[in-house]
Amino acid sequence: MLFPFLVSLVGLFFLLVNSILFYRTRKNKSIQYFIITIYLICLFVEELFCNIIGFYNPGSNFFLSHYYFIFQFIALSMFFRNLFSNVVLKRGILFFLILVLILLAMQYYRKPDLYWEFNLFEIGVTSALLILYGLIFLIQNLKKNKSNYLYFTNGLVIYLISSLSIFLTGNTDSVIFTEPFLLDFWFFNSLFYILYQFLIFKEWKALTVKDRLRIPR
């Protein structure tokens, strides 16, 4: 059945909408806003190819996961680095960014066959660090309801925890859409992805309202 694939397309549609919204309102915005815009656009392109390849040839799109996780790690590491004001946190994020990229380069050099498979180390370390950065940001802003990027960070943390738990529990075979349809973990992961995109939209809306309030009438 096509139901799991159709659910993933709903998430892809919301991703496209968010990409367009952020791109159209990118002028005179902060570096964080610019990073999210680039992140969403590149994510859409990757997800589009992933869905097309996965639909016509299930199981042959695993190599795209490397581009997804590495790009996401680089983009959102820079996002949080620009979001934090604490110098120690900024240096820590930069240190782990360089360290993880070096470790992954060494891993792929030693085991080039990993390119065609899911790399659990890559998934685990990049997702865990982004979850950590997100939680630190949320804890720092618990009493600041008007802080920017709270919706985005909440959505990111929820989605990454969901996605990471699936990979680390060994349910990677469920990525392939096969008959008959089973209500597996990946279905719920798709729902969390839709929630993530909804919260990104809420973030865009909140930022847009704040910008309008700043404009003198």
Image (cartoon, helix red, strand yellow):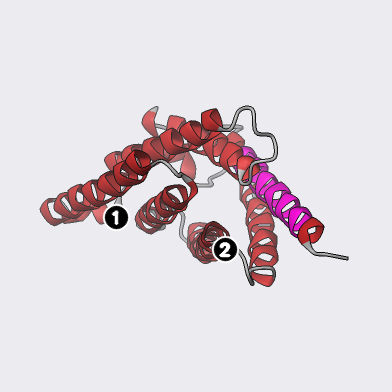
Vertical comparison of 195 with 63: above or below:
above
Under circle 2, the secondary element is helix
Residue 176 x, y percent position in the rendering: 48, 46
Q: Tell me which amino acid carries mark 1.
A: Trp
Residue shown at 49% from the left, 48% from the top:
83
Residue bearing mark 2: 37
Instruction: Name the image quarter holding residue 41.
Output: bottom right
Of the pair 92 and 108, the residue shown nearer to us: 92
Does residue 210 belong to the magenta stretch? yes
Q: Which sits in the foreground, 16 or 7?
A: 16
Q: Residue reaching furthest front?
A: 216
Q: Residues within 10 Å of mark 2 (few under 14, many from 20)?
A: many
Q: How many marks?
A: 2
Q: Determine which residue is flagged by label 1.
A: 116
Judged left or right of residue 185, residue 215 is: right
In the image, which disc is placed on residue 171? Answer: none
Residue 91 on the magenta span: no
Q: Quick one: SS at disc 1?
A: helix
Of the numbered discs 2 and 1, the one sitting upstream in the chain is 2
67, 170: nearer the viewer: 67
Q: Which residues are magenta?
A: 190-211
Residue 109 visible in this rendered orientation of the protein = yes
Q: Residue furthest left?
A: 110
Q: Residue at x 77, y 59 (%)?
A: 214
Position in image of residue 117 (x %, y %): 30, 49
Percent of width and height locating residue 87 = 36, 43
Chief secondary structure of the magenta span?
Answer: helix
Horizontal and vertical percent for residue 79? Answer: 47, 52
Q: The C terminus lies in which quarter of the figure?
A: bottom right
Q: Decide: few, some or many residues near mark 1? Use Cα within 10 Å; few <14, some 14-19, many ≥20.
A: some
Amino acid beneath label 2: Thr
